[in-house]
Image: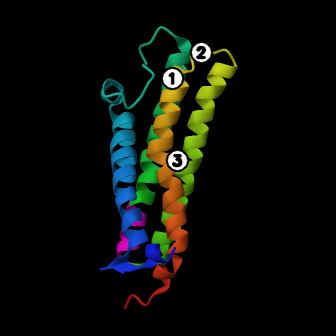
């Protein structure tokens, strides 16, 4: 783990990796995709960022869409704030950056499990008859949030001493 705590300019290597992940997964997925989904659902649906149409004749699809819309709003607000706090806190080497980053990583891991298990539940409970949706959404969530969340969590814990340095 020494290589992850080795300084490369302003930050240790592990912190640089965290910054890249938070910028990509946090800004693109959370701030862009989820905010777009909340404010312009149909556009997000057309771009493939969401999967359920509010105009569907299928009541289950409309219900899932409404629930996902609410989750998108919550994601944009809560995770969006955590993304910003993480980036500012890391840049300023403040403890709140560590706390915000760890919280964000845990949320990403939780959301990955929640969304994936919901899709599997829809199949197991006979609501949908094809696992293709669960496989697509689950894989996407694992790649966009789950794995990045685990990596961010590990790297922040390994580099926790970085946040205790004198910042004056």
Q: Are marks 1 and 2 in contact (CB under 8 Å)?
A: yes
Specify the label residue 133 is tagged with.
1
Tell me how far mark 2 sits from mark 3, CA to CA: 24 Å
Asked which secondary structure carries label 1, the reply is helix
Disc sitting over residue 146 in the figure: 3
Label 3 neighbour load within 10 Å: few <14, some 14-19, many 20+: many
Residue that extends furthest to the top in the rendered view of this protein: 57
Mark 1 or mark 2, earlier in chain: 2
Q: Nearer the viewer, residue 155 or 46?
A: 155
Lower sequence index among marks 2 and 3: 2
Instruction: Reply above or below: 131 against 153.
Output: above
Q: Residue at x 53, y 34 (%)?
A: 138
Q: Which residue is mark 2?
A: 128
Q: Is residue 87 magenta?
A: yes
From the image, give the main secondary structure of the stretch colored magenta.
helix
Quadrant for residue 37, please give it. top left
> Which residue appears at 36% of the width and 42% of the height?
35
Residue 56 magenta:
no
The reply to whether residue 70 is in sight is: no
Numbered range of the magenta stretch: 84-91
């Amino acid at each position: 783990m020494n290589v992850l705590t080795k300084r490369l300019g302003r930050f240790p290597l592990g912190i640089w990796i965290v910054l890249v992940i938070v910028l990509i997964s946090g800004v693109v997925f959370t701030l862009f995709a989820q905010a777009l989904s909340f404010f312009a659902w149909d556009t997000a649906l057309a771009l493939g960022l969401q999967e359920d149409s509010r105009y569907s004749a299928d009541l289950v699809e409309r219900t899932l869409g409404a629930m996902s819309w609410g989750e998108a709003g919550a994601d944009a607000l809560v995770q969006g704030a955590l993304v910003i706090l993480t980036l500012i806190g890391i840049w300023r080497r403040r403890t709140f950056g560590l706390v915000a980053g760890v919280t964000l990583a845990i949320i990403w891991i939780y959301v990955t499990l929640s969304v994936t298990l919901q899709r599997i539940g829809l199949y197991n409970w006979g609501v949908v008859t094809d696992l293709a949706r669960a496989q697509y959404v689950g894989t996407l969530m694992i790649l966009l949030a789950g794995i990045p969340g685990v990596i961010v969590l590990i790297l922040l814990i390994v580099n926790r001493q970085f946040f205790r340095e004198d910042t004056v």
